[in-house]
Amino acid sequence: MQTTVELPKAFSVRDEHEFLPVQHLLSRMSPRLVVRRVATGKHVSGDCTVFWGLVYLVDQPPDPRAVEAALREAGFDFAHNVLVQYCDLQSSEVEDA
């Protein structure tokens, strides 16, 4: 089965230990996919704090507007959270290469 997905895409998990299975699954699907933890904050429809991840292609790191758009689409509550970890995404790209 094949499908087309526009990247970057954001998602949330309740426990930070859930990132490893997501990273493993997506790396098995395609070694070109990168999963990064980019924020911690509330979902627009929830009251507990969750961990936010971003999926993008290894050779196409997203710019800050793309990260914000992906998080907004996934339900990141910008009214109550501040996105502060984007700089980690950029610096970690150099370390992983």
Image (tube, rainbow, N blue to C red):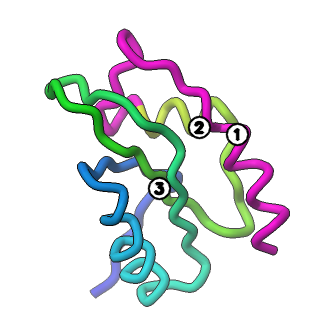
Residue underneath mark 1: 63
Q: Position of residue 5 (x, y in %)?
A: 41, 62
Q: CA distance from mark 2 to mark 3?
A: 11 Å
Position of 68 with respect to 57 (left or right) is left
Asked which secondary structure carries label 2, the reply is helix
Q: In which quadrant of the rendered view does residue 16 lie?
A: bottom left
Residue type at mark 3 is Glu
Q: In which quadrant of the rendered view does residue 96 lie?
A: bottom right
As drawn, the label of residue 6 is 3
Q: Earlier in the sequence, mark 2 or mark 3?
A: 3
- The span picked out in magenta is 72-97
Asked which secondary structure carries label 1, the reply is loop
Q: Residues within 10 Å of mark 2 (few under 14, many from 20)?
A: some
Q: Quadrant of the C terminus?
A: bottom right
The reply to whether discs 2 and 1 touch (Cβ–Cβ < 8 Å) is yes
As drawn, the label of residue 15 is none
Q: Position of residue 10 (x, y in %)?
A: 41, 48
Residue type at mark 2 is Ala
Find out whether residue 81 is within the magenta segment.
yes
